[in-house]
Image (cartoon, rainbow, N blue to C red):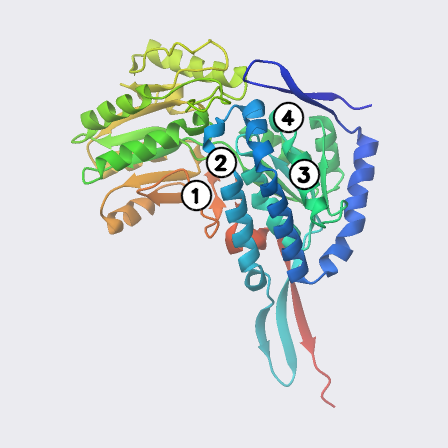
Amino acid sequence: MGKTLNCISPIDGSVYASRETLDLDAARAEVAKVRAAQKAWAARPLQERVDLVLAGVAAVGAMNDEIVPELAHMMGRPTRFGGEFRGFNERASYMAEIAAEALADIEVGEDASFKRYIKRIPHGVVFVVAPWNYPYMTAINTVAPALIAGNTVVLKHATQTLLVGERMAAAFHAAGVPEEVFKNVFLDHDVTSALIAERAFDFVNFTGSVGGGQAMERAAAGTFTGVGTELGGKDPGYVMEDADLDAAVDTLIDGAMFNSGQCCCGIERIYVHESLYDAFVEKAVALVKGYKLGNPLDAETTIGPMANVRFAEEVRAQIAEALAQGAVAHIEPFAEDDGAAYLTPQILTNVTHEMRVMRDESFGPVVGIMKVSSDEEAIRLMNDSEFGLTVSLWTKDLERAEAIGDQLETGTVFMNRADYLDPGLCWTGCKNTGRGGGLSVIGYQNLTRPKSYHLKKVTS
């Protein structure tokens, strides 16, 4: 007998959706079906797999009018922003476009005596454990290329976005992808760990907390199952003295506050050259004071509730601790702040790296801003973190940004932009942000294994 998963809506604290989890025996049976279907799926022509995946993506797009308010109910993102289909489609379409080249045999050489080449072979069954903050886009990062490469996929979504995997699977099945090729499941943590430990999967992709990633790696220990992880972040922005100030303020503050700060690559700390510091803070405060906190279903709302009360409690705790240690808060509490999921966005100054708000992942609408006097100081502070996902550099000097980027411990270096995932680039991190890489050609390399052919010809 399984357990009940409840999605608690941050709008009003009600139970928005419930689903029963599979017990271990039932889960084993479902995964066995997916494994049995893999060889036939991989045997289909590549273009056929590409076409079916893109048809599934289009079918998700056809549901967008239903998906957008559903997401607002489940995780609080305002409907005015229109959902995730643009990025969802962009990522899947790019991976489809590069599939033939990325999965092509690597020709090593052929002569009268030998033919040598390397093939890319699908792992088999890929297990995708997706997060709630961008539930469609984060899932498609792996689902699309895994299926295109010839793997079958088991998707387990976060409880906070309980209905997303169900919708994705239904859309893909309606488009012609066989049910056993792409299966959505509801599992608790114990069953998930047991399946991984039993080698039920050939590759595991996990996006979530550091603790969750550690649990995945512990479950896979000794099985030699590949585990790719994208975990926490504390992404910095650095505004140099020659930056476009208005653009830096608009982009970095949006990167810190959009989706109530619940972005994998959201900006969580900002370092500003002393010559621009006061002006940056003044403009940033004015921008945030103009936000409208409220019900995400209302068209005028620009910042909704956090996805869960416990997430908001952690942000409030970090802010309170920082204030007790001497930080200065610049935003007075909004009238709509209810002390629960609805949280006032906050800008803090007079912060230091002794404070948790500048060290621990906040994953909420708060950002600390520090004054710096040199690139060397900014580099030291940006690297003073256990995480390494992205960094956003603001300058007119491309060579300077490249030189600074080379010294930073991060997965992606942005210049004059932030909080964006380019599917042509590898999405990756270092340190406690995890390991592996999604999207781009490298995404296909991680979702397949190399198989070498060394063929000696009979010449007599």
| Kind of residue at disc 4 | Thr
Q: Quadrant of the C terminus?
A: bottom right
Q: Are marks 2 and 1 in contact (CB under 8 Å)?
A: yes
The residue beneath circle 4 is 159
In the image shown, does 112 or 413 lie closer to the viewer?
413
Q: Earlier in the sequence, mark 1 or mark 3?
A: 3
Q: Is residue 392 above or below residue 100?
A: above
The residue beneath circle 2 is 433
Q: Earlier in the sequence, mark 2 or mark 4?
A: 4
| Kind of residue at disc 2 | Thr
Looking at the rendered image, the disc whose residue lies closer to the viewer, 2 or 3, is 3
Looking at the rendered image, the disc whose residue lies closer to the viewer, 1 or 3, is 3
At numbered mark 1, what does the secondary structure look like: helix, strand or loop?
loop
Q: CA distance from mark 4 to mark 1?
A: 28 Å
In the image shown, does 215 or 125 lie closer to the viewer?
125
- Residue at the far bottom in the pictured view: 460
Q: Earlier in the sequence, mark 4 or mark 1?
A: 4
The residue beneath circle 3 is 155
Q: Is residue 29 above or below residue 314?
A: below
